[in-house]
Amino acid sequence: MEDINAESAREKSIRHGHPSTLHLWWARRPLAAARAVLFAQLVDDPSSHPELFPTEEEQKKERERLHGIIRRLVVWENINDEGLYREAREEILKSTGGNPPAILDPFAGGGTIPLEAQRLGLEAHASDLNPVPVLINKALIEIPPKFAGKPPVFPGAAETRLGPWPRATGLAEDVRRYGAWMRDRAQERIGDLYPKAQVPVLGGDGKPTGKTTEATVIAWIWARTVICPNPACGIQMPLVRSWWLGKKKGKEAYVVPKVVDDVAARGGRRVEFSIGHDPKQAPTTTSDGTMTTSKGATCVACGGFATLAYIRSEGASSRISAQLLAVVAEGNRRRIYLAPDEKHAQAANTPRPANPPTGSVANNPRWFSPPQYGFTEFSDLFTNRQLTTLTTLSDLVSEAREQLHADAIAAGLTRGEPLSNGGDAAEAYADAVATYLGMAASRLSDYGGTISTWMPDPKNEGIRNTFARQALPMTWDFAEANLFSESSGNFGFMLRGIARVLDELPARNGGNAEQADAASRDYTNLLIATDPPYYDNIGYSDLSDYFYVWLRRSLRDIHPDSFGTMLVPKAEELIANPYRHGGKESAERFFEEGFEQVFARARQAASPDYPITTFYAFKQAELEKEGVASTGWSTFLEGMVRNGWTITATWPVRSERGGRMISVGTNALASSIVLALRPRETTAPATDRTGFLVALHSELEEALPRIREGAIAPADLRQTILGPGMAVFSRFSRVLEDDGSTMSVKTALALINQTFDALQNEHDAELDADTRFCLDWFRSYGWDTRPYGDAESLAVPLGLSVDGIARGGTLTSGGGKVALIKPQDLAPGWDPAHDDRLSLWEVTCHLARAYATEGREEAARLMVGVKGRVDLDEVNRLATRLYELMESQDSSTAGLFNGLGGAWADVSATSTTIRPAAVAETLFGEEI
């Protein structure tokens, strides 16, 4: 699990070729996690084949071999390792009798699960109610296999490569070529809207020479404005979040406002802007910007204040304008910031296109604030220049398609030549490439609207896209990207992202993506693996309208079934949207009932041969407040159990790092859980509370060792133990309480946790005496220093002396005072060979300290040094126990044990590569 989680988190920083760059979609599941889950969903555990693996040791060895395949599968760099994937497919075929089931994700979203199913050689099916993810899934799994191995048709392109065009690389090349063709045509038509900038030429001393040269503009930075409400002022006041442009040390840049007289301006004055570079004069926390989102704006001319209510009323009356703050030009490995001039202000002053896309922004202030300020239509979220650019590109898609069709015929794809699955080859290919071109234009809108902002961050100085988060917020100063530049936000950037994805796609086995309601679609002969929406986490349909209006414009003729409606269907969307369903309570009821319908329908066609899998995404706030027994989680499980499913496993998936995000070694709970479910037998018996508890105790005790083989971080163990616990609960038709009522899932979750605690305590009695003393001491006193007598009263019943325990290296004793030694305070260079009183506590603390401070290699060396003297499986178990004990009292120390537990498999594997002699030389030095 830690390998899967680490690779899932690493994916966040991968862009070249990652499917997320095909087109934006929200809350995509990591490819690594989906790939691992699908493999595990179809491959038998070795215990299923006692005739091949009769002993537990043989089963463990085989399980580790299969885990090794998973470890390699989840590494991004192995994405096109055909040998590895052949090995994985052979395992799947072996476990499925050579006939693996077709995989369906009925909430396909960004397409992660169907794509990874296809990569593993499975027949992939995707469906979604929303046409935008349906198109994304078609682009990932349905279109590429049709043209796998085909060369590009753009004149001369096929000759640029010696040898074959594997997978969908030919399709990718045509996307690049015809995308460039579109860009050139657009530049011919609207290039004058994007003038170059005159930048000063610097001499050898770094000072201006008085000469200028032309440079391409990267972006124009604007501020929205309103009329100052002070009657004595009345100036057009800028609404600016921050004056900062760039914060790189030695290259600081910021906007400097100045009020000047201008008889032609409103009130006889206006604000003009220049660029400052002196860090000593730079904006401070108190002087940065004029706008606070929670209160309103301060006028730079009179100091008066415009409240949010006033700004909203001005917006409702269409009196919010925009003023150019700065021009950003390309320099020699740096940004050049220029003061605005009339030429650049006028270039943007182009007429609004006659036929911009139509559609209203959702009036839901939780996710969409622009309508409160008068920006009620999607076309209101773009400048006239941006609208002209996007409509020009959208219209060019159909022109490119016509050119493609002609070139496809010239390349040999004749009008009458059928595809293998029927249809006209030339037209189908032209439609395919045009689909990706339309997606590029849509993707450009994410950077090409007035919600995009400029980031002065030294590490990422540039344009932030519209959907930096899962909402459409109101912005005050915004960045307008140059379509024809080579910096972020340009059309070429969008094309490259899409083409690189196509280069890496498996493009095999065929695939199917369709628009369908998960609550009513057919599930016959399909195995479910899905990542459903979670309550009201994300308003997918309302958000995706932003892209839909552009996709509909360019691709309606190619995909009429997907883009026949004015906006995305919403009434049946399975999320708990209070604004659509009359409040939070009724919205949650709608979601829960709809979710039950999906799993009830899936149960009707479910096969007992394989488990289905589903991801459950916790809300962070929910975890912090209620933990793994949260109300939403128990309701979710209740619906599954009630509709005939047995929950057989719950595996924690973490895909975030840094800050509040999850990382190995921290104590935060996993942000998602993968559930495995099987259909419950219709003849399943009922039981009472006592019967449930007896079975629970027995089966959790048996499950714990196997769970630990998965290298679960201690912080995630309670989430994982819910799987075998819920397997016991949900295999009964019902569990009866003493009063005859049916036990709820919430009660069952509490009992599972209590049983887990009891098992932990029972196991403590089997530990060595020194370790039991340390556990008793920590439970009683933590890390506090206490009188010698307190220690003696705990030691004597265990047959120990306090001095003996202190000699074991876990305790300090002197002056009548005693305290446990924290792992962080243990001395480096500990030599287990010279320690004649090893305890599990001491070894676990030293390993945790070594792993946290010196790394895996040092921890592995210590592991080799104690091998044979202590049971290493017990050390791993104790790391989890210590995490559990310390997590609420001392989170930093608990984190050491969480890190060791999560990395146990890696440390163990490393220890097998270290020669004992090398260990001796390292530990004993000159004594060798």
Image: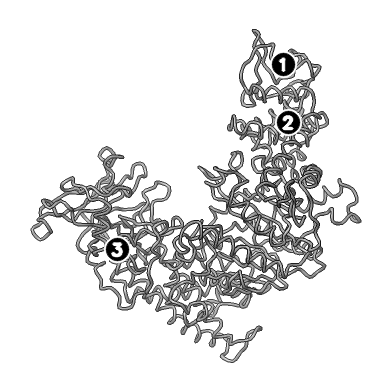
Q: Note whether 561 is above or below 879 in the view shown.
A: below
Q: Label 2, label 1: how many angstroms apart (C-alpha)?
A: 21 Å
Looking at the rendering, in which quadrant would you find the C terminus?
top right
Residue 374: mark in rendering: 3
Labels 1 and 3 touching (C-beta < 8 A): no
Residue found at the far bottom of this picture: 416
Q: Residue 149 at x, y = what percent?
A: 63, 75
Element class at badge 3: loop
- Near mark 1 (Cα within 10 A), the count class, few <14, some 14-19 or many ≥20, is some
- Mark found first going from the N terminus, 2 or 1: 1
Q: Note whether 209 is above or below 429 in the view shown.
A: above
Residue 442, image quadrant = bottom left
Residue 595, image quadrant = bottom right
Residue 862: mark in rendering: 2
Look at discs 2 and 1 and give the one toward the viewer: 1
- Near mark 2 (Cα within 10 A), the count class, few <14, some 14-19 or many ≥20, is many
Q: Residue at x 30, y 55 (%)?
A: 477
Q: Label 1, label 3: how many angstroms apart (C-alpha)?
A: 73 Å
Give the residue type that dot 3 points to.
Gly
Front residue (pair 815, 30): 815
Q: Is residue 928 visible?
A: no
Q: Residue at x 63, y 57 (%)?
A: 615
Q: Residue 874 at x, y = what percent?
A: 78, 34
In the rendered view, does 772 fall on the left or right side of 440?
Answer: right
- Mark found first going from the N terminus, 3 or 2: 3
Q: Residue 677 at x, y = what percent?
A: 72, 58
Front residue (pair 17, 548): 548
Q: Residue at x 57, y 51 (%)?
A: 618
